Structures are given as structure tokens and as C-alpha cells.
């Protein structure tokens, strides 16, 4: 596919991802400059979804490295299947020379490919999603920088492996930890905010078929009011918006009313504190009155 | 982008200047990022203003907090030449006004025919005061001059008196003073834009995270507080997610713990059936927070208690105290899960320490006497106070003792550092504590990162 902002816009539309000019320009430049795309933002604003959309647009594999505390290079790059190696040693102990056995033990058969190596060895440039990079430590970040700078890894027993096709790299961060300047410098950066009312209406219309326009508008406005309340700790994500909307459609709603909101608010707010705060400070009646304006 | 702008200078020069402007506004921009901009603009459609702006944004801006600054800088920098020259004229007028005010203050504030030794800020403070208060200062000077046996030796006393009076006034006038014009880039165009953006931030009451972070804590309005609290909680959460360099044992498949694995499998003749792993432990400090709730700290108390409350929800090993004339333990209050407004009201109603005078010595003596068991070598003590304490000698010796017993003492002082030398207690206490100026959320973040949650 020839990359251009317009072509990307078509691709995103086809995948039903509502992308504004800023998202399209940023993704386009990351692709053109062959640089990792770093997406930051609250949970549930659609960061991970962008990598899935890109994999579909380019009709390529999505390889995901889910980060967590204590993730180290072995888990990210490759490991030797040493249980299998041990068994092999036990079986072949008496009838094979040591050198032959050692060569055999460190061959492809015993190599466990982890996401980074898999992405480097892919025949067709995959989308490599490094999800929640802020969960790892600085040490891993430094190692990642090294891999992302030249897409070459050295496996002592197998030699140096160079990526034939440079993967499309997408990193996401929930902003729970400051990422190092070095990592940020090498990336094209985009901060994703919660959608505006207009954008949320578009998302709902494209993802929930058969919904009435009036309800779409009211849901989007309601979400804006709830997210703007700074005391709500866990703000509803786009996925939660869609769950709520689908539930409302399933209940044959054509507009929001207080009873409906009261009985379904637990699809939007997932902690007791937030639900209590909503009932005490926003209230279903006031919410419905506001979205009708 | 307008054609006029392109005519005036090459795009390359503009971009380099724009990067300098961002740096002067506190945005971290490296050379490699400037090169990225050039490469990006080779690929983007620069006749499309939106695409041009986003190309700059995604390559030069890597911090969400600085987004507002970037937007303003872009709008001002890439505006039409006539708008720019108008802004330049306004700035020159401001500089002239400022110089005139300094001159007026120099003329007015004289003792025995010579101007008093005052810095620029103090002179500007004087110029911005109401006329009746200016007159009071002038009258004092005049009466002193004509007093009996008054000679040149009186000058230092008079200067100190006028300085302290102006410093008190500065607090009230801070928002109305002309823009701060230090740290010029040397480029008139950039300095004009920078001053314009900075003056836009002053007292605008805007609630963006960035502005909240840079606002003096005592100036936070009720409208700002929920936002400030969110910024603060996310800051504490970020700190709690820092990971230590040490490893601990774990059942999760993580890094192989070779030593333990070999030991466990000796009975199998060295064949490794049982694998042990280790993972990085999170650094979880043990904290003791002491907050000054005396009268002089009243403007800060509400926010600082929210800060302690936030720490209480994130740090398991935390002890909280408030003090003024004596000290009171509030650890149980920190651990309750009520909403903050309700619990702070309970605390104020049940405490005897609110709004009194400050006696750090007595307070620390009580702490040592009643709660010595919590003063451990791994404890970091955080003192939140302006240092205006009576009983200096006793306070000093108690601080010294405390310093011996705990890991370290971090003192967060809402008084700006350039005023510390006016408070004798502060220089005395600095011998035993690491003192930091801390009157904005940004200051708070720096200290937390460097001193308390460093790993």
C-alpha cells in the first residue's frame, strides 16, 4: 500500500477507528520515518487499538509484547528450552560425542522465540506492539532502545540476526511512570485524550449499528460530564462507553432517563467509590436534564 | 502557514528558532528531534497548516504537560508579521513602563540624598503599591532623616526596614507585576513571544495540569483543588511504581535464581527439576511525615494535608504527625477510607494544634518521648514547615538527635529559597536536614523523585 495521509484515513475508516488529523499525521510520519510510535494516554482511549488497525491495514501479523514488572530480555527476546535440552542429554548421554551433542542442543529446535526475536525474523514486516512499556524498569528500556535502534540481535550460539524487514513498532504507555528521555527522543510521540463529544458520537455510530441519533448524542454528552468530574477515579473508557450503549440499545432505549441510568451505571463506573460519588454529586436526574439541553 | 512568514526567512532558520523558543519555555528539545522535524517536513504537506503543526508537535513535544505551551508558542511564532510587530511594540512599551517604575522608586526611596540599596523586584513592588501606602514609606524616610542625632550609620537599619515592608507587599502584588523578563534568549523576537506566553499564564485561573503544577500551593482556589489533587495522586502513584534495583524471590516465572536452583536440585544429582525465580522488588520507603499546622502555615495546611493523605493511601509504611506548639499523631486518620473533606473536618475538630504558634523543639521532644519506637534507621522523615519556630536552640538540638536516629530528614519549605536568609531559624536547621523550596506541585514532584522515592 502506498502510504499517504489520505490512504491512512481510508484505512482507519475501513477499520471503524475514528481518527482525527493529528492521529493520522503522527502515524503517517512514524511510518514514513521508520520510527517507533509512542502512544501515551489514560487506559481505554484506544492506544492498543491503533496497532491492531495498522496490522489490518498492512495485512500483516500483529506481534504483541505485553510488558509487566520485572520483564527482562530473556522473556522479550528468546530463551533456550532447557527442560527439553535436559531430556536430550539424559537420552543421548552414552552414545554421542560431547561436541556433537552441544551443537545439537543449541540449534533452532531448542530455541523459544519471544516477541522481539519473532518480529525481527518475520519475512513480512509485522506490527510489533510493545504494550504498557511504563510497567517495565529503566534497565529493560535501555535494552529495548538498543534493539529498536538497529533491529539486530546477537544470539551467541546462532550468530547475529538482522531484521530483513523493519517492523512497524508501536509502544503504549499509561503514563504511570516517566519514560526515559532517550526512549522518547527516538520515538514519534502522540498523547491520546478521551474523545470529544463529537468524536465519541462518531465512534458510537460506527460501532453500534441501529442506534438512534438522539441516544448517541445523549450518551456522548453524559460521558463528557462524567469524565470531566475530577473526583471520578477510574474514568470510563471507550470500551465501557460501547458496552453501556449496547446495553441501552438492548433495553430498547431511545433516550436516557434517570431510571435507566441508575440501573445501568455499573457498566460505566467500576468501583463502589465512583458509583457512590456519581449518585451523591452528579445524580441520574441531573445528568439526564443536562444531556437533554 | 502564511506565505509572508516564508518570504521573510527560510523554513530551516524558522524551525531552529522555534526549537529555541520551546527550550526557553522549558520544553526539552534535543538536536536529534530538530533533525526529525526536518525529515518529517520533507514527508508532510507543509501547505496544510494542521499537518504542519502536527508534524512539529509529534517530533518536538514528548510531554503531555507542555502541550498548552506548545500550542501557544506555535500560534504566536507562526503568526502574520504585522501581528508580530504589534506584539513587539507592546513588549517594548512594557519594558519602558518597567524602567520608568524603577526610576520612580529610585527617586522616591532615598535617605540623606542617596538612593536606598534595593533590588529591582523591591522597586517594582513599591511602584505598584497604592499611593497612600507609598506615602507612608516616604513619610517614615523623611521623619527619620530629620530626627535628632541621625547620621549615615542609620542607613542599614532604614534599608532593612523598607526591604521587609516591601517583601510583605510583594506577596499581594505578585500577580499584577509586569512579566518576569530574566533569562533572555538574546533574540528579541523569541523573548517577546516567550514573555507573551508567560504573561498569559499569570493568574489566568486556567486549570490545565501544567499550570496547576506551577501554581503556588497557597494560591490554589477551591476550583483548582480537585484537579490539583488528581495531579498529586497521579504523581504519588508514579513514584510508587518506581522499581528497585534489588531482586527478591518470586513464584512467577521471571529471572532465574541460579544459586537457589542449584541448591534445591542437589538431591537430584544436579539435574534441574525445580526452578526458582527472582524478580525486582518495588522500592517502598518507610515514611514519617510531620506537618506544621501553625498560624503562619495556614494558607498551605489544607493542601499539604491532602498530600499526606494521598501518601497515606499509597505508602503502607507511613506515620503522620501534625504540630504547632506540640505534636499530635494522625496516622489512624491517614488510614481511613472516608472522603477527604469529611475526614479533614473531623481532624480539625478533634485536634488541639490548629493555628497556634510553632515550637519545633517541644514537638520533637514529645515525638521522641512517646513514639521513639518508630524512629528507625530506614525511616525517611519529611517535615513540611516554613521554619518559623520559637525556641531555636532546643529545636536545633532535637533535630540533631532525630537526624542521628533516622535515615534522613527532608524538609519541604513553602517559603521561596531566596527569602531563607531572612529567617535565622532556616539557616540553623539546614545543618541537619536537606531543605528544599516547595511551593508548587512541580517542586513537590522534583523532591519526591530525587530524595524520597529514589531507587
Image: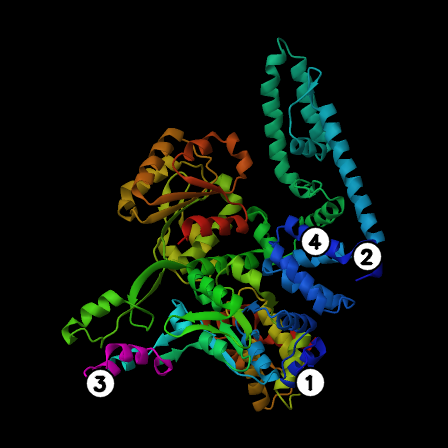
The secondary element bearing badge 4 is classed as helix
Q: Is residue A63 magenta?
A: no
Q: Which mark is residue B16?
A: 4
The secondary element bearing badge 2 is classed as helix
Q: Is residue A251 visible?
A: no
Whole-number angstrom distance, CA of label 4 to CA of label 1: 48 Å
Q: Is B353 drawn above or below residue B38 in the view shown?
A: above
Q: Which mark is residue A91?
A: 3
Whole-number angstrom distance, CA of label 3 to CA of label 2: 77 Å
Q: Pick the residue in front: B18 or A281.
A: B18
Q: Which mark is residue B5?
A: 2
Secondary structure mostly seen in magenta is helix
Q: Pick the residue in front: B69 or B246.
A: B246
Q: Label 2 marks which chain's residue?
A: B
Q: Which mark is residue A213?
A: 1
Q: Label 1 marks which chain's residue?
A: A
Q: Could you say which quadrant of the image residue A215 lies in?
A: bottom right
Residue B70: horizontal and vertical position, in percent?
A: 67, 57
The reply to whether dot 4 and dot 1 touch (C-beta < 8 Å) is no
Marks 3 and 2 share the same chain: no
- Give the extent of the magenta segment: A88-110
Q: Residue at x 67, y 32 (%)?
A: B120
Q: Mark 3 or mark 2: which is in front?
A: 3
Marks 4 and 3 share the same chain: no
Q: Is B269 drawn above or below residue B82 in the view shown?
A: below
Amino acid at each position: 500500500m502506498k502510504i499517504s495521509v489520505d490512504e491512512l484515513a481510508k484505512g482507519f475508516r475501513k477499520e471503524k477507528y475514528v481518527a482525527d488529523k493529528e492521529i493520522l499525521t503522527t502515524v503517517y510520519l512514524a511510518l514514513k520515518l521508520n520510527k517507533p510510535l509512542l502512544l501515551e494516554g489514560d487506559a481505554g482511549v484506544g492506544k492498543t487499538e491503533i496497532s491492531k488497525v495498522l496490522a489490518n491495514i498492512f495485512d500483516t501479523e500483529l506481534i504483541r509484547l505485553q510488558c509487566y514488572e520485572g520483564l527482562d530480555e530473556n522473556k522479550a527476546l528468546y530463551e533456550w528450552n532447557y527442560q527439553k535440552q535436559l531430556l536430550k542429554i539424559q537420552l543421548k548421554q552414552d552414545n554421542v560425542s560431547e561436541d556433537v551433542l552441544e551443537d545439537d542442543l543449541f540449534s533452532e529446535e531448542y530455541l523459544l522465540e519471544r516477541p522481539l526475536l519473532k518480529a525481527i525474523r518475520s519475512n513480512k514486516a509485522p506490527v510489533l506492539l510493545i504494550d504498557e512499556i511504563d510497567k517495565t524498569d529503566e534497565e529493560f528500556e535501555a535494552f529495548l532502545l538498543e534493539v529498536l535502534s538497529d533491529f539486530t540481535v546477537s544470539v551467541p550460539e546462532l550468530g547475529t540476526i538482522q531484521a530483513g524487514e523493519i517492523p512497524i513498532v508501536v509502544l503504549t504507555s499509561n503514563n504511570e511512570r516517566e519514560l526515559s528521555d532517550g526512549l522518547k527522543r527516538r520515538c514519534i510521540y502522540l498523547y491520546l485524550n478521551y474523545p470529544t463529544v463529537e468524536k465519541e458520537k462518531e465512534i458510537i455510530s460506527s460501532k453500534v449499528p441501529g442506534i438512534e441519533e438522539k441516544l448517541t448524542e445523549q450518551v456522548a454528552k453524559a460521558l463528557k460530564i462524567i469524565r470531566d468530574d475530577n473526583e471520578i477515579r477510574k474514568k470510563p473508557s471507550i470500551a465501557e462507553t460501547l458496552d453501556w450503549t449496547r446495553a441501552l440499545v438492548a433495553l430498547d432505549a431511545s433516550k436516557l432517563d434517570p431510571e435507566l441510568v441508575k440501573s445501568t451505571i455499573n457498566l460505566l463506573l467500576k468501583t463502589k467509590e465512583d458509583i457512590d460519588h456519581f449518585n451523591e454529586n452528579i445524580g441520574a436526574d441531573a445528568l439526564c436534564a443536562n444531556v437533554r439541553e | 502557514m502564511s506565505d509572508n512568514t516564508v518570504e521573510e526567512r527560510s523554513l530551516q532558520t524558522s524551525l531552529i528558532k522555534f526549537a529555541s523558543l520551546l527550550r526557553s519555555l522549558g520544553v526539552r528539545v534535543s538536536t536529534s528531534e530538530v533533525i526529525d522535524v526536518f525529515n518529517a517536513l520533507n514527508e508532510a504537506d507543509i501547505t496544510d497548516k494542521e499537518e504542519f503543526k502536527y508534524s512539529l508537535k509529534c517530533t518536538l513535544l514528548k510531554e503531555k504537560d507542555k502541550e498548552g505551551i506548545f500550542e501557544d508558542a506555535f500560534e504566536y511564532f507562526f503568526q502574520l508579521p504585522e501581528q508580530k510587530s504589534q506584539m513587539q511594540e507592546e513588549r517594548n512599551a512594557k519594558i519602558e513602563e518597567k524602567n520608568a517604575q524603577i526610576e520612580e522608586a529610585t527617586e522616591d526611596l532615598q535617605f540623606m540624598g542617596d538612593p536606598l540599596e534595593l533590588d529591582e523586584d523591591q522597586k517594582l513592588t513599591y511602584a505598584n503599591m497604592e499611593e497612600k501606602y507609598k506615602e507612608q514609606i516616604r513619610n517614615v524616610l523623611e521623619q527619620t532623616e530629620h530626627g535628632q542625632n541621625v547620621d549615615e550609620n542609620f542607613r542599614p537599619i532604614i534599608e532593612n526596614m523598607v526591604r521587609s515592608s516591601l517583601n510583605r507587599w510583594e506577596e499581594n502584588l505578585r500577580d499584577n507585576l509586569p512579566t518576569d523578563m530574566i533569562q533572555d534568549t538574546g533574540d528579541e523576537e523569541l523573548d517577546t513571544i516567550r514573555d507573551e506566553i508567560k504573561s498569559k499564564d499569570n493568574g489566568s485561573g486556567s486549570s490545565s495540569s501544567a499550570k496547576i503544577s506551577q501554581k503556588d500551593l497557597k494560591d490554589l482556589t477551591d476550583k483548582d483543588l480537585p484537579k490539583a489533587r488528581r495531579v498529586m495522586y497521579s504523581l504519588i502513584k508514579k513514584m510508587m511504581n518506581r522499581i528497585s534495583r534489588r531482586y527478591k524471590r518470586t513464584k512467577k516465572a521471571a529471572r532465574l535464581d541460579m544459586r537457589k536452583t542449584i541448591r534445591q536440585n542437589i538431591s537430584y544429582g544436579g539435574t534441574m527439576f525445580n526452578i526458582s525465580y527472582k524478580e525486582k522488588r518495588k522500592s517502598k520507603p518507610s515514611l514519617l511525615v510531620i506537618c506544621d499546622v501553625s498560624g503562619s502555615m495556614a494558607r498551605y495546611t489544607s493542601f499539604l494535608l491532602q498530600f499526606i493523605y494521598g501518601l497515606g493511601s499509597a505508602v503502607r509504611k507511613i506515620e503522620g504527625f501534625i504540630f504547632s506548639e506540640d505534636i499530635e499523631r494522625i496516622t489512624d486518620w491517614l488510614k481511613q477510607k472516608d472522603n477527604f473533606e469529611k475526614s479533614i473536618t473531623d481532624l480539625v475538630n478533634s485536634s488541639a494544634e490548629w493555628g497556634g504558634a510553632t515550637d519545633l523543639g517541644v514537638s520533637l521532644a514529645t515525638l521522641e518521648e512517646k513514639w521513639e519506637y518508630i524512629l528507625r534507621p530506614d525511616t525517611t522523615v519529611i517535615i513540611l514547615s516554613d521554619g518559623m519556630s520559637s525556641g531555636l536552640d532546643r529545636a536545633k538540638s532535637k533535630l540533631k538527635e532525630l537526624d542521628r536516629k533516622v535515615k534522613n530528614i527532608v524538609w519541604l519549605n513553602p517559603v521561596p529559597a531566596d527569602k531563607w536568609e531572612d529567617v535565622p531559624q532556616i539557616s540553623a536547621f539546614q545543618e541537619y536536614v536537606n531543605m528544599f523550596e516547595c511551593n508548587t506541585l512541580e517542586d513537590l514532584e522534583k523532591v519526591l523523585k530525587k530524595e524520597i522515592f529514589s531507587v
